Amino acid sequence: MPEITYREAVRDAMSEAMRRDGDVFIMGEDIAEMGGSMGVTQGMLQEFGPERVRNTPISEMAIVGAGVGAAMAGMRPIVEIMYQDFTTLAMEQLVNQAAKHRYMSGGQLKVPLTVRTQGGAGWSPGAQHAQQLEAWFVHVPGLKVVFPSTPEDVRGLLFRSIYDDNPVVFFEHRTLYGIKGEVPAEIEPIELGQGRIHREGEDVTVVATGRLVHEALAAAADAEKDGISVEVFDPRTLLPLDEEGLVSSVKKTNRCVVAHEAIVRMGFGAEVAALVQERAFDYLDAPVERVGARFSPLPFAPVMEAYVIPHEEDVLAAIKRTVGRNGNG
């Protein structure tokens, strides 16, 4: 299978959808000549032209609002929000419009809108350009929320999201754009709501999202040196969530750690912990451990940023706590 970057996988999914379907187009700030702030849409203007690769004014509410209207009119727009922090400027359109129209119309209206956005720490962007806000959107009925961690998954899930008849908020992590991975020669759509086990294990399940999937895999390799067998489960889509796959994994290992870059308090991990407690309590041999960012705006200084966000060693420490081992193994 060919090996491509996460960035190339995102571009590949959008380009292939646009080649196949004239109703698919993309719009956002600086996505045309500039190729997007992260270089994801480079070359797409040359292939598809300015009608289908559209620069927009600097107004997230207008961008998403136009996307909602285009979707209800029969198009399949892909809207790029430059940083997920800026989704806060489009919450009215996302939460009260995109998420509600299909329900309020009794199914007469569809809103096949894909809102791509990126964020995440690890490169000192400061407090207004690196938040992880996925838990906000998982709380909204009518939206679907996707957060892939590998090139294969981001390509298959994005292609599938574009053809979903419901609005999808599609999260990408800034530091993952350069990672490489094998993908099928032909795009294989991945159904939303299906998690993925990246590593089989017997002693503890680590449920991880985004960048933390890779931190969890590194922690699992370190834990193996101490005789701890770790299973790494990536939900891939947060809504709908693969509850059966997640719970089955925890029932097998009898322990659970949930890890994400977002702030721990009220984060997606709290929902996972509640789900495990409700559906697998009798199988648990230890409390569910949560790993995430400290309750702080993200500092600009690299050393302080590193202090606030979670890393491999934080996941490893949680693994060792839940299996009853100290830091020395």
Image (tube, rainbow, N blue to C red):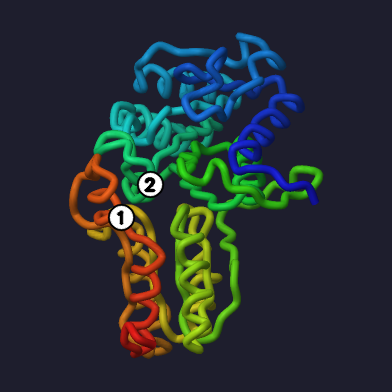
Given the image, on which type of amino acid does mark 2 rest?
Answer: Gly
Location of mark 1 (residue): 309
Residue 42 seen anywhere in this rendered image of the structure: yes
Decide: is 313 above or below 149: below
Residue at 45%, 35% in the rendered image? 117
Count of numbered badges drawn on the protein: 2
Q: Nearer the viewer, residue 166 or 159?
A: 159
Q: CA distance from mark 1 to mark 2?
A: 8 Å
Q: Nearer the viewer, residue 224 or 104?
A: 224
Location of residue 65 (image quadrant): top left
Check disc 1: other Cα within 10 Å, few if <14, some if 14-19, many if 20+. many
Decide: is 66 above or below 246: above
Q: Residue furthest top?
A: 50
Secondary structure beneath dot 1 equals loop
Location of mark 2 (residue): 122
Q: Is there CB contact under 8 Å for labels 1 and 2?
A: yes
Left or right: residue 186 compared with residue 142: right
Left or right: residue 145 compared with residue 245: left
Check disc 2: other Cα within 10 Å, few if <14, some if 14-19, many if 20+. some
Q: Nearer the viewer, residue 208 or 177?
A: 177
Left or right: residue 172 compared with residue 53: left
Decide: is 123 above or below 74: below
Given the image, on which type of amino acid does mark 1 rest?
Answer: Ile
Residue at 56%, 42% in the rendered image? 178
Secondary structure beneath dot 2 equals loop
Does label 1 or label 2 sit earlier along the sequence?
Answer: 2
Q: Nearer the viewer, residue 200 or 269?
A: 200
Where residue 249 sits: x, y (%)? 53, 77
What mark, if any, has residue 290 been given in the picture? none
Locate the C terminus and report the quarter of the image it occupies: bottom left
Decide: is 79 above or below 306: above
Where residue 179 sits: x, y (%)? 58, 47
